[in-house]
Image: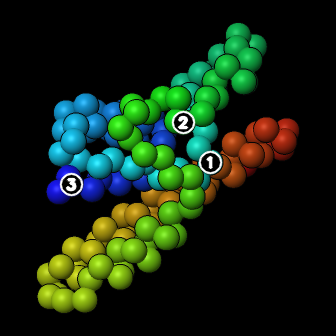
Amino acid sequence: MPARVVVLGGGVGGTLAANLIDKELGRDAQVTVVDPTGMHDYQPGYLYLALGEAKGHWLSREERSLLRPGVDLAIEMCEPIERFLRQQVDEPSDIADAAASLAELARAVCERQHAAAARTESSANGAPER
């Protein structure tokens, strides 16, 4: 049975990690990227956008187009991941502690994703960033 690997976020790091894991482990791992929008914004390119050297639509692509065929993409928010982690743990206490730490990490990643999505939406609507 293949290992199940879940990557939270389809940014540069998440996309790269998912593709490398799939390449290295192949059928030994089932890799899924969870991303709230399914779109990948190449954030280093924002500098060129600000300088008028690039068009915004050139910096955004569908996440699926950047993932290897063996990598699954789930377009959803992270809250279901936290619920899943909590449901997996009923005993013993060391597993519960590890799951709690993982849930905290997942919550932090989700908060960053929500903040980044809000900033992207505000920028797209012309609102000044705070």
In front of the other: 129 or 122: 122
User: For mark 3, does the 10 Å Cα neighbourhood hold few (<14), some (14 to 19), or many (20 or more) residues?
Assistant: few
| Amino acid type assigned to the residue bearing label 3 in the image | Ala
Query: Sequence-wise, which precedes: disc 1 or disc 2?
Result: 1
When asked about the image quadrant of residue 93, the answer is: bottom left
Q: Residue furthest top?
A: 53
Residue at left offset 50%, top offset 52%: 74
Q: Which mark is residue 37?
A: 1
Look at mark 2 in the image and give the residue it sits on: 63
User: For mark 1, does the 10 Å Cα neighbourhood hold few (<14), some (14 to 19), or many (20 or more) residues?
Assistant: some
Q: Is residue 75 left or right of residue 105?
A: right
| Amino acid type assigned to the residue bearing label 2 in the image | Glu
Query: Sequence-wise, which precedes: disc 2 or disc 3?
Result: 3
Look at mark 3 in the image and give the residue it sits on: 3
| Amino acid type assigned to the residue bearing label 1 in the image | Thr
User: For mark 2, does the 10 Å Cα neighbourhood hold few (<14), some (14 to 19), or many (20 or more) residues?
Assistant: some
Query: Sequence-wise, which precedes: disc 3 or disc 1?
Result: 3
Badge 2 marks a residue whose secondary structure is: helix
